[in-house]
Image (cartoon, rainbow, N blue to C red):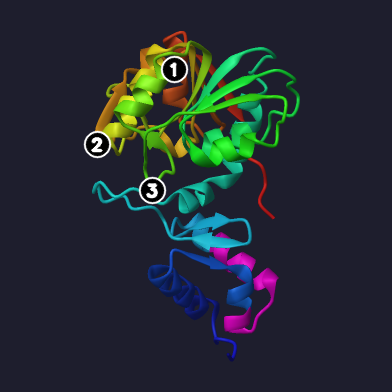
């Protein structure tokens, strides 16, 4: 294709492509517009700064749905949202785990990053309801990995329902790492799905310590189903873009707060 005349026209076309497809790559845009990677990266960065798309490694994705409807985003796309923040949060959260502990990893893209960063541990029992996390944990031959049974949700690749909850109730865990969809000081933690909320509530009851892991975009949000009040959390791990007023409120509740610098995306 011939190069489109102006940057304005090119960026408008990029947004149109994202309206038709959930994600685009730098490579495909270079071919489409017959321009360099440097040019496309600049276009995507400018559109990201204008809050018109989200930058990812190697491309961009459309902004998540914010119209209030109960539409869950696929696991693949969730993994691309705020990717650099999730990498840093997962790496730091993994450092809070000690040898010999029994930990519980909730389903989600941020908790998945924790599973990727457990190389420093020799002995660990990990319980999870996330299929992708359980598969990732298989690389640690020395760990005891327990995958909860139950109904497998297509969107999240997680097990939920009465069977998953009854499986979980026979275990006592040292630490729960909870991936949070929505965090609101007044309204607590919430999520899209009733069954996800139920299994999360059971996780709370079977864990000595609850560590919420979430990027800063999840604060001041309220979702469809209530999970628990904020004061049931012991620790929060997030990125350093957390709003200052939320940071102050969390600390005033005697909740440990760790903020990390997002990793750069090439």
- The residue labelled by disc 3 is 155
Residue 82: within the magenta?
no
Helix, strand or loop under label 3: loop
Residue 46 visible here: yes
In this rendered view, identify the residue nearer to me: 199 or 113.
199
Please tell me whether residue 29 is drawn above or below residue 248 in the rendered image: below
> Where residue 245 sits in the image (x, y, percent)?
42, 24
Residue contact between numbered discs 3 and 1, judged by CB atoms under 8 Å = no
**In percent of the image, x 39 and y 15: which residue is there?**
169
Q: Quadrant of residue 36?
A: bottom right
> Where residue 205 sits in the image (x, y, percent)?
38, 12
- The residue labelled by disc 2 is 224
Sequence order check, earlier mark of 2 and 3: 3
> Where residue 263 sits in the image (x, y, percent)?
66, 42
Residue contact between numbered discs 2 and 3, judged by CB atoms under 8 Å = no
Per the rendering, the mark at residue 250 is 1
Q: Quadrant of residue 237?
A: top right
**In percent of the image, x 70 and y 17: which residue is there?**
123
Sequence order check, earlier mark of 3 and 1: 3
């Amino acid at each position: 294709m011939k190069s489109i005349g102006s940057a304005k026209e090119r960026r408008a076309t990029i947004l149109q492509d994202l309206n038709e497809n959930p994600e685009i790559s730098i490579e495909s845009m270079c071919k489409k517009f017959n321009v360099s990677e440097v040019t496309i990266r600049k276009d995507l960065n400018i559109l990201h700064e204008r809050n018109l798309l989200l930058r990812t490694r190697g491309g961009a994705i459309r902004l998540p749905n914010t119209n209030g409807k109960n539409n869950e985003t696929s696991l693949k796309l969730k993994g691309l949202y705020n990717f650099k923040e999730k990498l840093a949060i997962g790496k730091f959260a993994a450092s809070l785990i000690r040898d010999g502990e029994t930990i519980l990893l909730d389903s989600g893209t941020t908790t998945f990053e924790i599973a990727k960063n457990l190389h420093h541990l020799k002995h660990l029992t990990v319980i999870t309801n996330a299929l992708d996390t359980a598969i990732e944990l298989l690389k640690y031959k020395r760990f005891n990995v327990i995958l909860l049974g139950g109904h497998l949700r297509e969107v999240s690749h997680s097990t939920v329902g009465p069977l998953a909850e009854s499986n979980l109730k026979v275990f006592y865990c040292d630490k729960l790492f909870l991936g949070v969809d929505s965090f609101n000081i007044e309204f607590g933690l919430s999520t899209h799905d009733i069954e996800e909320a139920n299994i999360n509530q059971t996780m709370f009851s079977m864990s000595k310590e609850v560590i919420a892991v979430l990027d800063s975009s999840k604060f001041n949000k309220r979702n469809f189903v209530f999970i628990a009040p904020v004061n049931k959390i012991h620790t929060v791990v997030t990125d350093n873009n957390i709003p200052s007023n939320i940071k102050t409120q969390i600390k005033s509740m005697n909740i440990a707060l760790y903020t990390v610098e997002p990793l750069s995306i090439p």
